[in-house]
Image (tube, helix red, strand yellow):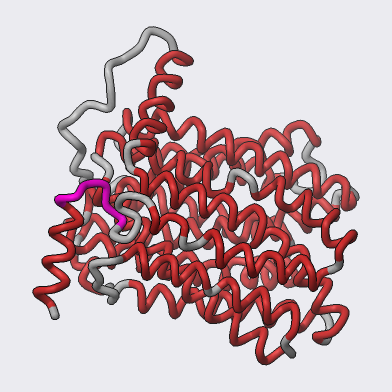
Amino acid sequence: MLAALSHRDFALLWSGQSLSAIGNRMFPIIVALVVLDRRGGAAGLGLVLAVQGIALLVGTVVATSVGDRWRRSRVMMATDGVRIVGVIIIAFAPATLPWPVFIGAIVGIGAAEGMFQPAYRAALPRVLPRSHLQAGNALTSLSQYIAIVIGPSLAGVVIATHGAGIALWIDVATFAASLATLSLIREHASTEKAGAAEAGLLRRGARDFTEGVQAIRVRPWLAASICMSTLVMGFVMAPAIVAAPIVAEERLGGPQAYGAAFTALGVGSILGALLGSRIRTGRPGVVGALGVMTIFGAMMSLAFLPLPGVVLCWAIAGMGLTIFEILWMTAIQQDVPDHLLGRVLALDWLGSDGLTPLGFALAGVVVGALGTRDVLVAGALLVLVIAPLPLLVRGGTTFSSTEADDAARSAKAEAAL
């Protein structure tokens, strides 16, 4: 992974992303406590989080158009600027800010985050050579999962000792630092245009969206992988997240067990990022499918095993999912032309998480009707069926859209042996 950091522009991009990732992970904790302090209650908190989630989806839809027409570093700078302004608005008066202004700031922050993530992933091929993309994606995953550990902990400590206002200003500082690093990047933009300009913003956006869908459709491995991720996230992971605290309370020892399982998932993800940068294989699709199938052990352990078994299996699942993510993202960046990459990654983001809200909504009903064990076992079996399906389509085993690429990868693997 360290080889990627030898490239100045990637080192700047990654350091800024790492800081903004910490800010992203701090913000939900801060907002939750601020809403409760404002006596919004559970209903108010649910409304705020729902609004933020919808805004994130809207921002991702917008990214399908602007991500390939603007320089990606400029998209990220603009979104960091929006997040800075939004958090500052809340920071000045978190307890007394009028609700419409508070919600408006939340909307801006959520939409900006939805635009930032696809732009960042699409920028990597412009600041790294092809041979170092896997290392760059591994570093990105590593920093994201470390932020999951640091961000909420930092927010909790600062709020407890100095209040939500100071925590919000620290959040502003992370985004400002990211903005500063982005301003120093020399991005190597594509010479190919994103597409002919259309008269009218909506028409142009529709054209860009359609071209992104077409770019996915002609790559069967990519379309199948997005569908697989959508089903796994919506109908396996969402029920598991709903069932986990119930199982922890019923038979694993309470909230501490729930926290231990997700800590293990995070630790496993960090290990997966370290390993993911070193994997060299001519069949990344096969390795990725095996990584997704580690969810089977996590689900079954939650249904039947004591806490030590749950912790071990969830750590393995975190490792497997992160390896899949790194190999998959590297393949997309290598296979999709640069002038289409921004919108494809935005559509990937939308598609992979598209059914998750529905999964959460259904999970509560299904768990109540069938019980946690039946739901977890059904999810585990579903993973075994769904995860290998992308291997059955063209390019599914190699994460490549052309037979020429398949042959080249196979030859390279054979030569290495």
**Image quarter in which the C terminus is found:** bottom left
Q: Residue furthest left?
A: 415
Residue 53, how many percent across, how many down?
66, 43
Residue occupying image coordinates x 70% and y 69%: 156
Q: Nearer the viewer, residue 265 or 365?
A: 365
The image quadrant that residue 192 belongs to is top left
Residue 403 part of the magenta segment = yes
Residue 341, how many percent across, how many down?
32, 40
Main secondary structure along the magenta-highlighted residues: loop
Residue 155 part of the magenta segment = no
Residue occupying image coordinates x 58% and y 38%: 57
Residue 416, how many percent across, how many down?
12, 77
Q: Is residue 279 left or right of residue 51?
A: left
Q: Nearer the viewer, residue 40 or 295?
A: 295
Residue occupying image coordinates x 47% and y 57%: 389
Q: Nearer the viewer, residue 330 or 122?
A: 330
Q: Is residue 45 visible?
A: yes
Q: Is residue 352 left or right of residue 188?
A: right
Range of the magenta residues?
399-404
The image quadrant that residue 375 belongs to is bottom right
Q: Is residue 336 left or right of residue 170?
A: left
